[in-house]
Image: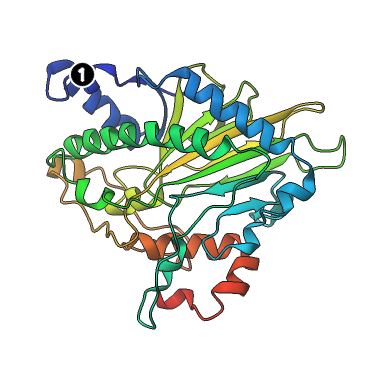
Amino acid sequence: MLPILDIADYLTDPTGAKGQVFVRQLRETCHGPGFFYLTGHGVDKMLDSNALETANRFFSLPLDQREALSIGNSPHFRGYTLLKHEMTNGKVDWRDQIDIGPEEPAPQLTATSPPWMRLRGPNQWPASLPEMPARITDWMDHIHPLGMALMQALATGLGQSANYFDNRMSPDAYTRVKIIRYPAQPEGAGSGQGLGLHHDSGIMTFILQDEIPGLQVLSEGKLIDVKPMPGAYVVNLGEMMQSATNGYLRATKHQVVSPPPGQQRISIAYFMNPRLDARFEPVALPAELAAHARGGQNDNPADPVFAAFGANTLKIRMRSHPDVTAAYYADVDLSDL
């Protein structure tokens, strides 16, 4: 089972004795398994319920209404991805989803604008669910300060000032949400892969699960089931935090298996990200921590982790959505990012 970390004491008094116990637990957990349940966060459970109920209503819409929001319409990688339109490790992922980011107009670009500036822009929302923008945005607005608290606790645990990451995280943080459905696969005809084994690409991820299990985490060479825990978020780190700490913090691989026949699984992933122009250069770790750093770059030399967040994010998005890449990023060479 994953560690369970209660953040309540840290939120009440970050510098107090109990708050510092949480700091040590968080650092050790992110150095070790890299995944944990977060409790004591104080987010109203009604916000979670509203977000999940809205997600279910979205996936109940007629297919043509969802297809009208195709991510292929958006240079900002916002919108709906059809079932079986993504692959991981050469196999089809059996899921569909809608990607949502900060709601804003597309920026005015010039010939010298970095290509990751195109990631900013409006979302695509279904007209038949007018309550969806407010409900999802409200949930996002309550997760963000929780993410900031965790970033400050991590900074302290790494021997830095609590505000070490703050100027990278605001203003205009590029937070992002994926609302995902994992339907059952046809009996005897599917691979069982809802989402293939991978690690996240950014900074930190919060996962809100419904009651249907399916998430699995690779721990000491074995896959362990991450059963839904009412009132808890599942939290993990991405490759940029692993790279910035030379591997002291871990971006742990995980996957999702499809639910049994007659069921579907809904999850909402909140990606706690910095500004697009932020850089995550190596953190000067205390000697006692640096001695346990494993090396932070990816095993695959063809997939380097960039220190610039916008470049690293665009790299992943372009690879995940070749239709958007062909339509809006044909001029971008990943090797130049």
Residue in the picture at 51% in, 16% down: 230
Image position, residue 267 (x, y; %):
58, 33
Residue in the picture at 58% in, 45% down: 197
The quadrant of the picture occupied by the C terminus is: bottom left
Q: Is residue 6 above or below residue 222?
A: above
Q: Is residue 222 visible to us here?
A: no
Q: Nearer the viewer, residue 280 or 8?
A: 8
Residue in the picture at 42% in, 67% down: 116
For this view, does 263 lie left or right of residue 248? right
Q: Is residue 96 above or below residue 257?
A: below
Q: Quadrant of residue 86?
A: bottom right
The local secondary structure at tag 1 comes to: helix
For this view, does 28 lie left or right of residue 69? left
Q: Is residue 234 above or below residue 107?
A: above
For this view, does 220 lie left or right of residue 30? right
Which residue has dot 1 on it? 12
Image position, residue 269 (x, y; %):
51, 38
Q: Is residue 271 visible to us here?
A: yes
Image position, residue 113 (x, y; %):
36, 76
